[in-house]
Amino acid sequence: MLDESPRLSLIGRLMPSIMRLRGSNKNHRTRERVQRHLDFRVRNPESSDPPKRLSGRVTVSESSEEGWRVFTISPTTGSTRGTVIYLHGGGWMNEAVSQHWKLIQQIVVEASVTVILPVYPLVQAGGTAESVVPSVARIGERAERPLTLMGDSAGGTIAMSTSLLMKEQGLPVDLTVLIAPALDMRMENPEIDERQPLDPWLVKKGQLLLTEMWIGENGDDPILNPILGDTRGVGRLVVFSGTRDLLNPDTRLFVQRADAAGKQVEYHEQPGHLHVYPLLPTPEGKQARSTIVDAVRRTTETR
């Protein structure tokens, strides 16, 4: 069992208990619960609209690309220096939430970039890795450089798969930022079962149904299942993971394999913290968000 870091903030130490009290894993506990939630979302789809209250320092426009709604978020004043394509998390079954939009606003304002947020089809609407990843790559082809691909959780899967695909196409992106990504759709790492009691959010049984729906018959595909991908030549990689995250063992393995292949990864692991901790309202999350902005800013300044 992993111990919590003595450096973890009070709210960081309380967060697992808060998540359990909120029942944050209720829709992931079993395959049946996941299926019920998917059925509910088919009958009651979430809105993909931006929050009504956004900072006056950004403007949001909407367009249609690849048959999807696509939001473009830009600074209200001043010029921009490149593009970030943000792929939101939510288990491939939920739309973007306020935490995603807050991070996007911070990146736009503090790094002076344009952020593109594609509303990609979720699994209950037929979205799969095989159809979504090439579409994101085509959006990336048309985007202003330097280009960053960024995503959290399920969105981190899409970001890494797209980065691998664009490298294969001879169009490597400048920076890929992965926030608590799902990197192996098979979830065969034995350390996952050891980590399960520590994670108050994700549950392997339910998660497997979602990964199966997302990857289909492509579990051995080195692009659509990123743990198998060749990371050489994909540009800078910055990765965040907390140790109380079911996905952390595969994230560690991904970083180790990249390092063994000669690809240096800027890896930020937060002992004692949860899934997608950079999006959470904790001091550790705040520091991670600043690190993300700095990574994007450095990418724009070195082009």
Image: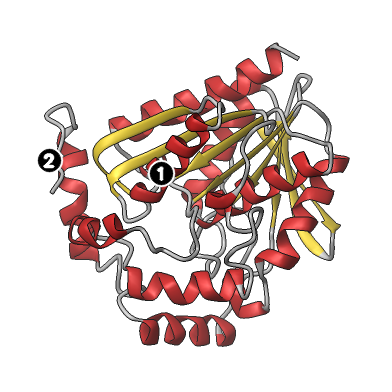
What kind of residue is marked 1?
Leu
- The residue beneath circle 2 is 3
- The residue beneath circle 1 is 253
Residue 22, horizontal then vertical, whole percent: 24, 64
- Return the residue found at the far top: 302
Residue 190 occupies quadrant? bottom left
Question: Is the C-beta separation of discs 1 and 2 under 8 Å?
Answer: no
Please report the residue visible at 69 percent of the width from the left and 44 percent of the height from the top: 164
Please report the residue visible at 15 percent of the width from the left and 44 percent of the height from the top: 2
Check disc 1: other Cα within 10 Å, few if <14, some if 14-19, many if 20+: some
- Return the residue found at the far front: 260
Q: Estimate the spatial distance between the alpha carbons at disc 1 and disc 2, rounded to whole Å.
A: 20 Å
The answer to which of 264 and 90 lies nearer the viewer is 264
Residue 256, horizontal then vertical, whole percent: 43, 36
Residue 186, horizontal then vertical, whole percent: 47, 66
Query: Would residue 51 be seen by someone viewing this image from the given angle?
Result: no
In the image, taking residue 270 as reference, residue 79 lies left or right, namely right
